[in-house]
Image: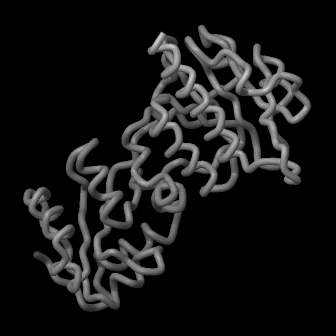
Amino acid sequence: MKQVDSAANPRFKALCRLVESSQERRRLGHSVLDGVHLAAAYLEHAGLPQQVVVSRSSLAEPEIKALLTKMAALEPLLLSDALFRKLSSVVTPTGILAVVETPRPQLVPRDMDACVMLEDLQDPGNLGSILRTCAASGVRHVLLSKGCVHAWSPRVLRAGMGAHFALSLHERADLAAAARSFGGKLVATSQRAAQAVFEADLLGRTGFLFGNEGAGLSAVLLKAAQVVVSIPMPGKAESLNVAAAAAICLFERVRQLRVNSKQ
């Protein structure tokens, strides 16, 4: 196990550039997974990372020990706790960080049973939460427009909590073209829609459209939707966060699928 105790070490300085610079991550095609949960999710779904970094004190943690055993083919980089804290982007580091190859954007398939199309989402927390909801609700395909925040940025990865590795992410997608070629019904939300989401038929091939946090969906995508629904809000809030709206819609589909399977 290679040990590093100096901030002047070339390997440590390279890691710092990777953690701090989105330009560096894009240049190298690498992403950084910070924490036990993300490292374990990658190992389960994708295999060995390119590099694993641990703090000295974390070697006593059972979860870290178990992960390192599963990654026995790799030589971990061991950092002092002080150096690891400089690398970690979380308040309380868990003591492990993995460098992985960023998956390339996948081509949008024509035979998707269900999907979510996201237009120009800017908040990493919102995107990560929606990805978790997609993974939990069984919607595998997520299409992101060119204007969306990068799905593999550290903040999105943290918010996604490993959901990335259970999904097919299609970044920089032409959503208008995807909407035209989608073989099912497309569902969008609008506060002005007369039909509530709980009254809409969400069975069969269904795609959900969600837009920018402030501007919402573009006129082009809103027009492409065959079904436009509202989310009833009997309380005093004027609107819902896009991640909350997505969760309501996707799990209403889950509810309908469960009811339909029992009939």
| Quadrant placement of the N terminus | bottom left
| Residue at (32% x, 79% y) in the render | 12
| Residue at (42% x, 67% y) in the render | 18
Question: For the image shown, how many numbered marks are present on the structure?
Answer: 0
Expressed as whole percent of the image width and height from the top left, the position of residue 180 reads 69, 12
Expressed as whole percent of the image width and height from the top left, the position of residue 248 reads 65, 38
| Residue at (77% x, 48% y) in the render | 240
Residue farthest along the right direction in this orientation: 192
- What kind of colouring is applied to the model shown? one colour
Q: Is residue 197 above or below residue 40?
A: above
> Which quadrant of the figure has residue 163?
top left
> Which quadrant of the figure has residue 67?
bottom left
| Direction from residue 38 to residue 219 in the image, left or right | right
> Which quadrant of the figure has residue 31?
bottom left
| Direction from residue 9 to residue 154 in the image, left or right | right
- Toward the viewer: 172 or 129? 129
Q: Is residue 6 above or below residue 206?
A: below
Expressed as whole percent of the image width and height from the top left, the position of residue 17 reads 44, 72
Q: Is residue 160 above or below residue 227?
A: below
Q: Is residue 137 above or below residue 158?
A: above
| Direction from residue 230 to residue 25 in the image, left or right | left
| Direction from residue 42 to residue 134 in the image, left or right | right
Expressed as whole percent of the image width and height from the top left, the position of residue 32 reads 39, 61
- Toward the viewer: 87 or 157? 157
Residue farthest along the front direction in this orientation: 263
| Residue at (56% x, 11% y) in the render | 204
